[in-house]
Structure formats: structure tokens, C-alpha cells
Amino acid sequence: MYKRQENSTGGTVHLTLDAFIEHPCAICSEILLPINLALLSNHPLAEIRKVYSHPQPFLQANNWLRQNLPHVERIEVDSTTQAMVKAREEPFGAAIGSEIAAEEYQLSVQSRNIQDSQDNTTRFLVIGRTDTRACGDDKTSLMFSVKDRPGALLRVLQPFEQLGVNLSKLESRPTKRRAWEQAFFVDADGHRDDPQIQQAIEAIEPHCESLRILGSYPREKSPAELEALQREAHKQG
């Protein structure tokens, strides 16, 4: 199963983090996909009155919409599929999606590449039941809550710095169990079997009310990193 976790422009998909709080699922790998967005409609831009979309594409194409459709109503829906159906059925409606979806839902591409950043990338998490072996370039995702006392979060983060473990992500979400209780999500460079990660987990456990390893998995290289590696390989012939 795939879960959209975050976008380089639109940020984190909070429903995915909430799913980790509510369900005992594990991360097996991650996938980084470049995202190209299009405005899809059976009406030209000048006639469009409403644009339907999942909240994330609205964030990713905010500047384009403000510049090209400043007075058009934006209506959030639960999924891209729902947006396509609405755009097809609604007079003077449009949707944000992929060019591939245009053919499937009998819509026309009115404008291509409307994402604000040409490096627009979405991170997907692969959810499963099995552990992934270390490959030498790994990432470990953790979820924890801390005791409600001064310096509690600092005491959890300090061991990572002391052991030289880089944290590439830190985010919090309400646990919904108690008022103001937060679950923290951390992505750490390294595999759960690496000595530094093991030592860090042992060091932070006494300072956590709850602690769960969501998974260790190969770190996916971004499109920019892959392009740089290809250029380097080409130079070396």
C-alpha cells in the first residue's frame, strides 16, 4: 500500500501522519515522484468559474491560480478523482490533475505545468509488514511522545546530535488521546541496526512516554540528486 506523505511545495499530508498514530503500520520504503500538474476542463480559461481539487494541488499551484484565475472560486474535495468528476459535470468547472487523467475523465488540457515549482516532488511511503535490510544509505522513521515537563523534547533530540545522527525531518501532530498531547515524527539518517541509531533509541527511551520505530528503509534519491549522479558518471566516461 502507498501513502502520500509530503510534497516539496505543499508540505505534509496530515492524514498520513494521523494514520500512524491510529494504526500499527510500518514503512518499507519511500518513493519520490516528480509531479507535473495541469488545469483540466472542457471550457477555455476565460469561461472557467470554479476549480476543484484536493487541497495539496491547490497549494502546489497557488501562484499560477492567483495570476491566471484570480477571481475563480476554489473548491476543495476529498480526492483528485472527485475533482475530475466535478469538473466534467459542473458547467464552467475545472480540475487540477495530470494530463493522463484528462483522457480518462473526458476533459481537455487547458494549461500544462501549472505547478509553482518545476522541482515539484511528492514523497510516497510504501506500507507493509516486513523489515528492510540495511543498504548503506538508509533512513529510519520514529514516532514518539514526551513527558509534559520543561526540556523534555530537547532531552530526546540531544542524543542524536551527540551521536552524529542527522535528523532530516521533525514534525508533530495531536494524538487525539488527551488535550494538547503531541506525537512527534522524526526521520533519522541511518538504519535501525546501525550502532548509532541503536544507541540513540536506547538513550531517548527513558524520556519518552511512547516510542515506536515506524521502519528503516533505503533513502530514495531526489530527481535532482539522480541528475547530478548521471552528470558525474558522464564526466567520468
Image: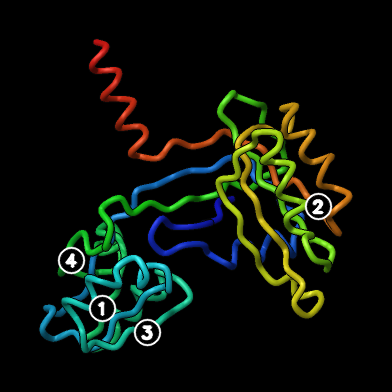
Element marked by disc 4: strand
User: Please, is residue 108 above or below residue 212 in the view?
Assistant: below
User: Please, is residue 79 above or below residue 159 in the view?
Assistant: below
The disc placed on residue 211 is 2
Q: Which residue is labeled 3 in the image?
A: 75
Q: Which residue is labeled 4 in the image?
A: 109
Residue type highlighted by circle 3: Ile
Closer to the eye: label 4 or 2: 2
Neighbour tally class for label 2: few under 14, some 14-19, many 20 plus, Cα within 10 Å: some
Residue lying furthest top: 237
In whole angstroms, how far apart are the C-alphas of marks 4 and 2?
47 Å
Element marked by disc 1: strand
Closer to the eye: label 3 or 4: 3
CB atoms at circles 3 and 4 under 8 Å apart?
no
In whole angstroms, how far apart are the C-alphas of marks 3 and 4?
19 Å
The disc placed on residue 94 is 1
CB atoms at circles 1 and 4 under 8 Å apart?
no
Residue type highlighted by circle 4: Val
CB atoms at circles 4 and 2 under 8 Å apart?
no
Closer to the eye: label 1 or 2: 2
Q: Where is residue 177 in the image (x, y as percent from the top left)?
A: 81, 74
Element marked by disc 3: strand
Sooner in the amino-acid sequence: mark 3 or mark 4: 3
